[in-house]
Image (cartoon, grey):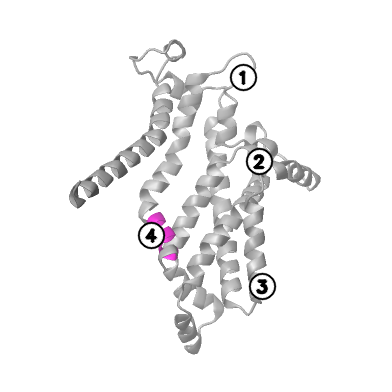
Amino acid sequence: MSAGARGASRSWLAHAALVGAAACVAVPVIWVVLAGFRTQISLLSGAFWFTPVLKNFREVLFSKTSDFLLNYLNSLIVGALSTLICLVAATLAAWSLHRMPWPRWFVHIFFGWALVFHMFPPLALASAWFTIMRSIGLDNTLTAVILAHTVLNLPMALWLMGVFVRDVPVELEEAARLDGATTPVLLRRVVLPLIAPGLAATSILTFVFSWNEFGVALTLTMKQTATVPVAIAKFAQDYEILYTQMAAAAALSILPALVLLIIGQRYIVAGLTQGAVK
């Protein structure tokens, strides 16, 4: 076999593998979205052809017994505020660790502990958080979920921002210092513009992780403060599972993350590859 034929064969296999991987991700999502437009009978009978209906979406969004819109707002608030806190804390911590005269062993231990903490199962901490929040009067509040999600996602944000802050040329910061820039001015006018792709990538990933988190939110919330994943799980009732309404709610839950990923995909790619290439 010639070199050109071998190259074409490898290219075909690579494209086939990519198409297969994409199908593994896309087919379940498409199935769930389509299930939201089915009737319960059509779905359970396994009929391939069906007449689309909007009943499930109306029940999820506008039914008098449904709190899904409130749960949607809760998730948006929790995701946005926890992401904002993570970005501020991770950026300042990363700049401090890489620019201030900390001993190198301390920096390595700090990042190592962040990595180890990120590997803890969230449910292992949920009961302790529930006890703490109840003792300080924050049980069944969005504040408790925001704080918990901040703690869960801060290690990841710190690792990501650490890469981008580390790669900012020290000479630029020194030049700004010589021009009389204070630390806040230095961060705002020199560091933040240079790490903007990293900020975008980190914010999107942090928001998506917060939006999808289930176990801790289930432990810390009740009906009025539940987030979207908790609300979707409640369609599985004691004597009946509302499959089509659950599918409709799941389809609606995809929208915020999908919009963010579409808008910020170039920032994610640029941000995640910038640190790796450097």
| Cα distance between the residues tagged 2 and 1 | 20 Å
Q: Position of residue 100 (x, y in %)?
A: 61, 78
In contact (CB < 8 Å): disc 3 and disc 1: no
Q: Quadrant of residue 256?
A: top left
Of marks 4 and 2, the one in the foreground: 4
Instruction: Please state the extent of the stretch shown in magenta in the rendering.
Output: 267-275
Q: Secondary structure at mark 3?
A: helix
| Cα distance between the residues tagged 4 and 2 | 32 Å
Most foreground residue, 170 or 173 = 170
Q: Is residue 123 magenta?
A: no
- Whichever of callouts 3 and 1 sits on the residue coming sooner in the sequence is 3
- Residue that carries the numbered disc 4 in the rendered image: 270
**Residue sitting at the far right:** 135
Amino acid type, label 4: Ala
- Whichever of callouts 4 and 2 sits on the residue coming sooner in the sequence is 2
- Residue that carries the numbered disc 2 in the rendered image: 216
Residue 74 in view (yes/no): yes
Q: Is residue 271 magenta?
A: yes
Of marks 3 and 1, the one in the foreground: 3
- Side (left or right) of 126 relative to 92: right
Seen in the picture, residue 74 relative to 27 is either above or below; the reply is below
Residue 62 in view (yes/no): no
